[in-house]
Image (cartoon, rainbow, N blue to C red):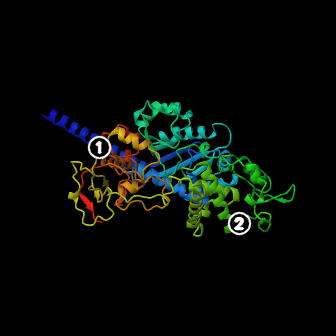
């Protein structure tokens, strides 16, 4: 008996020692987890040489850089909002590597910026936006940014404090084999997300299906800078001359002590389509050259009068109509005037010229139609006989609209979608959840030119944009209207599923539901798995 009691006491002591050891290990694990959580971060790595920020951000200089950094941080936060492993206080570290000298020249050559040095202001604003946002010059040697991004990814993906790596370099095939090496370890690859800006290169074909993908259209371009229209040769020669002086676009050429003034003529055709540019260029009355009283002093900008700008708008409108009589792009006209007169791109946003420029262009179009007898451009909606808006899918006034208006399970002939339906989290649910549409009809609407105006056909209030370039003249069947709504719902709303606008016709949940075949590549991927049970109708 004594022997058994002795053995029992020994086992009891062993159990106590084991339990103490387990408790000690758990305390250490808890402390380690707290340390990891306290320093946890998400790393965002961007190849600035092939992930281009939107033109409108770059043109704003320092303010645009600040806005770009904040938009990118917000986009990353929204993308990871529903990731259970991410906490609200996890840090977001953003590093953009690029050849700043080469990138600055590219933006200048593509006429996005007026000078090579202007891009540095954007970079400065980006770096000032947040202590963890860095736009870094990788140097001008080949593969400079590539090597830095690869090393940063390799270092951080195995860092226990790094929860996710978002990698932006979609168009550079040099990253394909490098990223492929991480696919072996699923625990590692599950923490990598590819950010798409430009289309993925073919080498990414297999990798894209095994890694998460997303895109931030409010931050990055989806087309290369090479698709931008370059400045004409004459203006490039003038710019080169100006930059050889003191970097000011309106400076005095020190070699000749003469003012450098842009004089440029666009191709001009008569009513028979014959190019008469040479004849017109010999006539000073059609040139945009400033008058002698407007010649700038060294280092000063040319001060154009309102009459000069109005004349330039009329002339460029007529030129554009001769080139493309079926459609007039107001932006192209304004851009030509900017380049010809050397005007700042933000002029058209000023109080004086925002509406005035549109009025002048409209008047020029009307005069051109009257003078030539040609029909107005298809997007000259103020001149076309616009039919009254049909009974739209979204009523303009939905007071008193009850939840019984929409049959959730059965699709009505034309669903009245006016109320904002929400789930228990307050997330918006589009009703009906699935809009059946004939694939052939969808294809027909996608390829239709000009495109149909969503607001005109889907809203009872119709389109209120006087300069809308989309078609308002077609008569749609109920099936076509429903298909148009389906296409509209395929465009992700900028507010996501938190939108509360009763007239929004964009999508807030994936039209394909949880069975979406696109998976993480779907633009609605972050909201694929939200609860679609409607618990609330937002009062209007």
Quadrant in which the N terminus is drawn: top left
Position in image of residue 499 (x %, y %): 36, 58
Position in image of residue 178 (x %, y %): 53, 32
Task: Judge whether residue 522 can be spotted in this image.
Answer: no
Question: Which of the pair 477/373 is nearer the observer?
Answer: 373
The residue under label 2 is 304
Task: Judge whether residue 77 can be spotted in this image.
Answer: yes
Position in image of residue 3 (x %, y %): 16, 33
Q: Secondary structure at mark 1?
A: loop
Q: Residue at x 69, y 50 (%)?
A: 268
- Mark 2 crowd level (few <14, some 14–19, many ≥20, 10 Å Cα): some
Q: Residue furthest left?
A: 1
Quadrant in which the C terminus is drawn: bottom left
Report the label total. Answer: 2
Question: Which of the pair 332/58 is nearer the observer?
Answer: 332
Question: Which of the pair 413/418 is nearer the observer?
Answer: 413
Q: Is residue 501 above or below residue 35?
A: below
Q: Is residue 186 above or below residue 217?
A: above
The residue under label 1 is 436
The mark nearer the N terminus, 2 or 1, is 2
Question: Which of the pair 344/148 is nearer the observer?
Answer: 344
Q: Secondary structure at mark 2?
A: loop
Cα distance in 3D space between marks 2 and 1: 56 Å
Q: Quadrant of residue 256?
A: bottom right
């Amino acid at each position: 008996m004594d022997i058994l009691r002795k053995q029992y006491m020994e086992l009891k002591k062993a159990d106590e020692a084991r339990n103490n050891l387990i408790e000690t290990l758990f305390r250490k694990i808890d402390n380690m987890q707290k340390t990891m959580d306290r320093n946890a971060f998400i790393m965002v790595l961007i190849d600035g040489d092939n992930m281009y920020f939107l033109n409108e951000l770059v043109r704003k200089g320092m303010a645009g850089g600040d806005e770009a950094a904040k938009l990118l941080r917000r986009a990353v936060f929204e993308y990871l909002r529903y990731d259970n492993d991410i906490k609200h206080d996890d840090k977001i570290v953003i590093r953009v590597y690029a050849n700043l000298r080469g990138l600055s020249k590219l933006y200048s050559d593509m006429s996005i910026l007026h000078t090579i040095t202007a891009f540095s202001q954007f970079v400065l604003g980006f770096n000032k936006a947040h202590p963890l946002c860095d736009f870094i010059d990788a140097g001008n040697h080949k593969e400079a940014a590539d090597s830095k991004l690869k090393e940063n990814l390799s270092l951080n993906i195995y860092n226990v404090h790094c929860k996710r790596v978002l990698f932006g370099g979609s168009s550079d095939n040099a990253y394909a084999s490098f990223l492929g090496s991480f696919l072996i370890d699923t625990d590692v690859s599950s923490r990598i997300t590819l950010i798409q800006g430009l289309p993925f290169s073919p080498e990414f074909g297999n990798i894209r299906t095994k890694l998460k993908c997303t895109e931030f259209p409010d931050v990055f371009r989806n087309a290369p800078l090479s698709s931008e229209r370059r400045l004409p040769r004459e203006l490039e020669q003038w710019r080169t001359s100006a930059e050889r002086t003191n970097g000011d676009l309106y400076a005095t050429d020190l070699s000749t002590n003469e003012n450098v003034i842009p004089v440029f003529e666009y191709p001009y055709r008569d009513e028979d389509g014959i190019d008469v540019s040479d004849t017109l260029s010999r006539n000073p009355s059609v040139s945009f050259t400033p008058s002698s009283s407007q010649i700038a002093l060294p280092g000063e900008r040319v001060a154009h009068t309102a009459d000069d700008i109005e004349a330039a708008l009329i002339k460029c409108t007529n030129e554009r109509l001769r080139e493309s009589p079926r459609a007039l792009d107001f932006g192209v006209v304004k851009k030509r005037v900017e380049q010809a007169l050397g005007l700042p791109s933000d002029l058209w946003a000023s109080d004086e010229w925002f509406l005035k420029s549109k009025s002048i262009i409209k008047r020029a179009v009307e005069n051109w139609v009257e003078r030539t007898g040609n029909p107005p451009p298809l997007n000259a909606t103020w001149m076309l006989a616009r039919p009254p808006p049909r009974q739209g899918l979204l009523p303009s006034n939905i007071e008193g609209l009850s939840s019984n208006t929409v049959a959730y399970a059965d699709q009505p002939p034309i669903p009245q979608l006016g109320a904002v339906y929400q789930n228990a989290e307050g997330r918006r649910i589009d009703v009906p959840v699935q809009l059946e549409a004939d694939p052939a009809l969808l294809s027909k609407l996608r390829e239709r030119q000009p495109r149909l105006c969503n607001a005109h056909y889907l809203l009872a209030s119709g389109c209120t944009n006087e300069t809308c370039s989309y078609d308002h003249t077609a008569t749609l069947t109920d099936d076509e209207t429903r298909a148009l709504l389906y296409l509209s719902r395929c465009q992700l709303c900028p507010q996501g599923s938190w939108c509360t606008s009763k007239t929004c016709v964009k999508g807030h949940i994936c039209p394909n539901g949880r069975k979406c075949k696109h998976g993480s590549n779907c633009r609605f991927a972050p909201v694929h798995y939200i609860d679609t049970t409607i618990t609330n109708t937002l009062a209007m």
